[in-house]
Amino acid sequence: MDKFLKHYLVTALWSSNDDDGTPFDRDHEIEDFSEEAIEKAKKDCESFKEKAGITLDRYSETSCGHDFWLTRNGHGAGFWDGDYGDEDGEKLTEISKEFPNVYVVKGDDGKLYIE
C-alpha cells in the first residue's frame, strides 16, 4: 500500500463517524477495512493520481492522500486551502470534485466499507 492510499484511508477513519457519532479511528485501524473497500479506495486513488498527473509530483503523497479524501467529501478543508499554490490547489480541487462523496460504514461482519 503506497503512502497516498494509506493516508487516504487514515483520513477516512478519523473524519468519519459510526452510528453513535464516534470517530471510526477510536476503535478501528486500516486493517479493519474490507478487501472490497481497499480495492475501491485504491481504484479511486489511482484514477485521481492519473488525472492529476505531474502536478502531484511537487507534493507529498501523505498530504495528497489526506486532502483527496477531505476535498472529494466536502469536509471544509483540502487542496484548496493547503500549501499547494493557487493554481495547483484549484486544479486538484476540481479533479477531486469529479469523484462522488463516499462514506465509511461498518458492516454486519465488523469490517469497514466505503459506500
Image (spheres, helix red, strand yellow):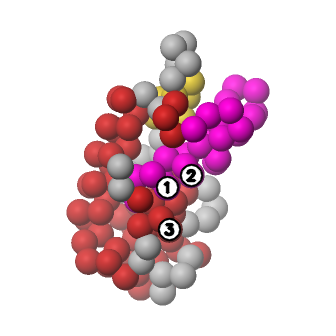
**Which quarter of the picture shows residue 83?**
bottom right
Q: Quadrant of residue 55?
A: bottom left
* Residue 21 against residue 92 in the figure, above or below: above
Q: CA distance from mark 3 to mark 2?
A: 10 Å
Label of residue 63 in the image:
3
**Which residue is under mark 2?**
11
Name the residue type under label 2: Thr
Would you say the residues marked 3 and 2 are in contact, meaning their CB atoms lie under 8 Å apart? no
Q: Indicate the secondary structure of the residue bearing disc 3.
A: helix
Residue at left 40%, top 52%? 5
Specify whether 76 is left or right of 6.
Answer: right
Task: Looking at the image, tell me whether mark 3 or mark 1 is earlier in sequence order.
Answer: 1
Observer able to see residue 110 = yes
Q: Which residue is mark 1?
A: 7
| Residue 87 vertical position relative to residue 52 in the rendered view, above or below | below
- Of the 4 image quadrants, the one containing the C terminus is top left
- Where residue 76 appears, as percent x and y from the top left, is 63, 61
Q: Nearer the viewer, residue 12 or 92?
A: 12
Residue at 36 percent across and 64 percent down: it is 95
How many other residues sit within 10 Å of disc 3, few (<14), some (14-19) or many (≥20)?
A: some
Q: Position of residue 85 (x, y in %)?
A: 48, 86
Whether the magenta-drawn stretch holds residue 38 is answered as no
Disc 3 marks a residue whose amino acid type is Ser
| Extent of the magenta region | 4-29
Contact flag, marks 3 and 1 (Cβ < 8 Å): yes
Q: Residue at x 42, y 77 (%)?
A: 59
What secondary structure is found at the residue carrying circle 2?
A: helix
Residue 18 is inside the magenta segment? yes
Rendered location of residue 7, percent (x, y): 49, 55
Q: In terms of sequence position, does the residue under pointer 3 or pointer 2 come before the other?
A: 2
Q: Amino acid at mark 1?
A: His
User: For residue 64, which quarter of the picture?
Assistant: bottom left
